[in-house]
């Protein structure tokens, strides 16, 4: 059987995507990519899937299609903690996200904030980001950490090597290795190559994610695949739930 790339992270109209589930499936088929619908599942994100009952209805719908059934859970929101195992098992895989990070004083900061308080210097920010990532990796039983390098808009102009110290990169990689989450190479928020190589070299599994919301984005994982290959990762080693297993229990014997 020929290998097909898997897009482990894409959105539909169940949350803030612009395409229906059927359109996402068709787009994947057109591009020769195995696709996932992984809509936001959170009480603090733009989504219809914001309660346990809504999660069941969402899965009922996805089960009508030939598509991987994912969900993107906000670490800072409690909904993922409330799902019973029999619902979790219906997901082929789950994605966890740092859409808010925890600051040293215990408050949460929204990563999509357009402005940063003065005390959140790049050094302070990256430390809080990595500390939050470490906590997510310890406590969240998801298969993939989405967009590990997602930064607030004002910080996206800083060169990643000026923001990330190698020590911060190493801590992130070791946290994922211990926690068992794959490192997503996101098309939407591309990670820098030094960190991708570090993750691959340490033995962290990599996954491809379009994080697509619109037609020209969903299933478009050309750039993430090129980055994985440049880091020396074999195609067959890229995360695919049925091949590599899932912490949801979906593929247990
Ligand atoms: Zn996200
Ligand atoms: Zn997403």
Image (tube, helix red, strand yellow):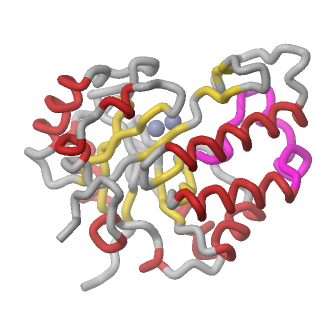
Q: Residue 130: x percent and y percent?
A: 73, 43
Residue 178 falls left or right of residue 24: right
- At 12% from the left edge and 48% from the top edge, which residue is drawn? 65
Q: How many marks?
A: 0
The stretch drawn in magenta includes residue 21 = no
- Going 87% across and 32% down the picture, which residue do you hit? 124
Q: Nearer the viewer, residue 19 or 56?
A: 56
Looking at the image, the residue that sits furthest to the bottom is 1
Q: Quadrant of residue 154?
A: top right
Quadrant for the C terminus in the image: bottom left
Quarter holding the N terminus? Answer: bottom left
**Percent coordinates x, y for residue 82 in the rendering:** 32, 29
Corner quadrant of residue 116: top right
Whether the magenta-drawn stretch holds residue 154 is answered as yes
Q: Position of residue 251 (x, y in %)?
A: 22, 65
Q: Is residue 233 found left or right of 94 in the rendered image?
A: right
Secondary structure character of the magenta stretch overall: loop
Residue 151's place in the image compared with 206, above or below, is above
Q: Nearer the viewer, residue 28 or 165?
A: 165
172 is higher (above) or lower (below) than 227: above
What span is in magenta? 147-165
Residue drawn at point x = 59 percent, y = 62 percent: 178
């Amino acid at each position: 059987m020929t290998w097909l790339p898997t897009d482990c992270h894409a959105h539909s109209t169940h949350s803030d995507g612009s395409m229906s589930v059927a359109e996402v499936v068709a787009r994947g088929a057109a591009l020769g990519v195995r696709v996932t619908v992984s809509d936001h599942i959170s009480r603090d994100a733009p989504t219809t899937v914001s309660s346990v009952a809504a999660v069941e209805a969402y899965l009922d719908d996805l089960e009508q299609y030939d598509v991987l059934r994912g969900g993107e859970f906000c670490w800072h929101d409690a909904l993922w903690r409330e799902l019973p195992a029999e619902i979790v098992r219906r997901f082929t895989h789950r994605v966890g996200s740092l859409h808010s990070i925890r600051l040293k004083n215990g408050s949460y900061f929204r990563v999509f904030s357009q402005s940063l308080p003065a005390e959140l210097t790049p050094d302070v920010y990256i430390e809080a980001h990595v500390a939050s990532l470490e906590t997510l990796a310890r406590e969240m039983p998801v298969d993939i950490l989405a967009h590990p390098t997602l930064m607030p808009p004002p910080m996206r102009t800083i060169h990643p090597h000026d923001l990330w110290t190698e020590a911060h990169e190493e801590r992130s990689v070791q946290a994922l290795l211990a926690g068992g989450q794959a490192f997503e190479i996101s098309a939407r928020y591309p990670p820098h190559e030094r960190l991708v190589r570090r993750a691959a070299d340490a033995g962290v599994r990599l996954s491809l994610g379009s994080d697509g919301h619109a037609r020209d984005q969903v299933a478009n994982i050309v750039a993430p695949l090129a980055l994985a290959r440049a880091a020396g990762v074999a195609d067959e080693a890229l995360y695919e739930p049925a091949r590599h297993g899932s912490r949801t229990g979906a593929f247990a014997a």
